[in-house]
Image (tube, rainbow, N blue to C red):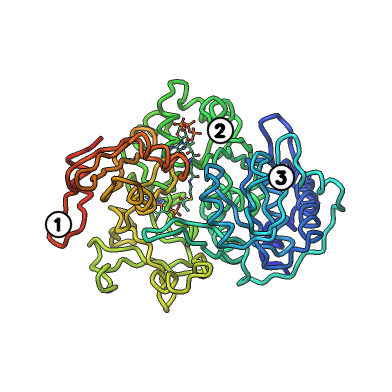
Amino acid sequence: MNHLYDALFAPHTTNDAPFLESDDGSIMSFRDFVSRAAQMAHVLAELGLAPGDRVVVQASKLVDTIALYAGAVQAGAVYLPLNTAYIAAEVAYFVGDAAPRLIVCDPKDEATIAGDSGAKVLTLAPEGGSLSAMADAMPVLFETAERGPDDLAALLYTSGTTGRSKGAMMTHDNLLSNAKSLTDLWQITDADRLVHALPIFHTHGLFVAMNTSLVAGAAVRFMSGFNVETILSELPVSTMLMGVPTFYTRLLADDRFDAEACAKMRLFVSGSAPLLAETHVAFEERTGHRILERYGMTETNMITSNPFEGERIAGTVGYALPGVEVKITNPDNGDDVQRGDIGMIEVRGPNVFQGYWNMPEKTAEELREDGFFLTGDLATMGEDGRITIVGRAKDLVISGGYNIYPKEIEDLLNDQPGVSESAVYGIPHPDFGESVIAALVPEGGAEIDVAQLQEVVERDLARFKQPRVYLVMDALPRNTMGKVQKNVLRAEHPA
Ligand code: MCA
Ligand code: AMP
């Protein structure tokens, strides 16, 4: 048996229905997709990948990229997707930590991406990279590797409030249990057509969107990236859209987006960042649809969802998914708080990861022995179990659905000449939800060369993490404990 493959892919071996519809109008059936996945699995096996070996994938959003994910599952490998915005310095860390046997990338990175890791490098490209060419020559049947529910299927790196990124170890059943729950809850069927405009290197676009479509046998309009024009032309012939709040504010900014454009749609899902209640209300006024907001994390997959049939309430993330336990605790001592009081969300269930790759001490800090994971999100739970997120106990900025950990940026800034200390924080942004600001304090007598600093930031950090504004000040505001008060910075320096 192969726990995930048997449920997601094997049932489609003889399914001729359309699965992936690409920007160029080409359509791949489920049956052809399963065959392509088998060819990918053959390549992995031929390269000597054994079950459990990691495959790092930093590649464009192509049908072959998804087929590689499926092929990795079939071959028993551990799929490790990376944001295409990460630059060389960031990728080098992931490669060093995960020690992959194979790296798959866009052709522009082929010569450099492996560093001295010794990993084999292959490419994927719209015009066909080396991996695609190798796969073309392979048989379309592959003897599926044995993998149980608790074997690793994927390693997803998530940044941390302290230090470097951590690889969240996801098992076959972490992914499958969540995909099945969501498919049931959102009543996804083979009559659906999903507009897929998310990146496929994060939980949202890869697992929430793709795995549910595979469970249900739903067609996927596989867009290479988000753009309003294409979405507007696809909505009239589609039934579902999954997105981050920025998708919905951008659609609302276009007058052509109205009830008629959504006439065939049955579900809009939002997640990865807070959806403003005002967006929820404006969306309903314009389209007649209530966005269904759900909440999750890389380490836990989806945790809560507003109901499909019951009331979807703006500003809340709904109820714990079936089989998932959520409690709200006092962050200081872990005790349950009274219903209605604010505390930290803790979660336990088949969706929760196995720990951080090679980091037992970090795992022990965030995953309790009894299986509850500390999310770092602050919320209340109503009498009926409905959860409302009210803030974060962790220092995190979410921009356009991407997580940005200030600590990573502060560490880099503090290392630069003339910088005594820094504080990085988020301020509200109309398009991305939040955007990043850096406050800098010069060393005594020194002057900070902001232009030079920016060069270093551009060299070492992905574009989406780069501060949009730099402020130089004499001192950072601190509380009596000496802790930097980012709320004060936010209030006094909102830009
Ligand atoms: C692009 N840029 C960004 C972002 N995206 N800057 C800050 N935050 C971003 N999210 C930069 C570009 O590098 C560019 O820089 C400039 O902003 C404008 O780019 P633009 O063309 O407007 O961007 P886009 O290509 O339209 O992308 C915006 C986007 C995209 C569609 C919102 O960021 C996106 O697809 N986000 C989804 C993220 C996601 O899937 N998150 C799920 C994580 P320059 O200044 O050089 O022009 S999974 C998760 O969080 C959990 C598990 C969950 O619950 O789902
Ligand atoms: P990530 O580490 O990329 O998996 O991001 C997970 C974080 O995104 C969570 O811990 C939350 O802070 C945030 N998040 C995800 N969905 C929502 C939501 N619907 N509302 C508010 N925050 C969310």
How much space separates mark 2 and mark 1, taking CA atoms?
54 Å
Q: Which mark, by number, is residue 123?
A: 3
> Which dot, 3 or 2, sits closer to the camera?
3
Within-10-Å neighbours for mark 3: few <14, some 14–19, many 20+: many
As drawn, which residue projects farthest toward the top? 255
Question: Horizontal placement of 367 versus 92: left or right?
Answer: left
Mark 1 belongs to which amino acid?
Answer: Asn
Mark 2 belongs to which amino acid?
Answer: Lys
User: Where's residue 475, x and y in %?
Assistant: 17, 47
User: In the rendered image, which residue does mark 1 sit on?
Assistant: 479
How much space separates mark 3 and mark 2, taking CA atoms?
38 Å
Mark 3 belongs to which amino acid?
Answer: Thr
User: Where's residue 417, x and y in %?
Assistant: 33, 46
How much space separates mark 3 and mark 1, taking CA atoms?
51 Å
Circle 3: element type = strand
User: In the rendered image, which residue does mark 2 sit on?
Assistant: 264
Q: Residue 336's image quarter?
A: bottom left
Question: Horizontal placement of 304 versus 57: left or right?
Answer: left
From the viewer's side, name the closer residue of 179 and 93.
93
Q: Residue 438's image quarter?
A: top left
Mark with earlier residue (3, 2) = 3
Q: Is residue 336 above or below residue 82?
A: below
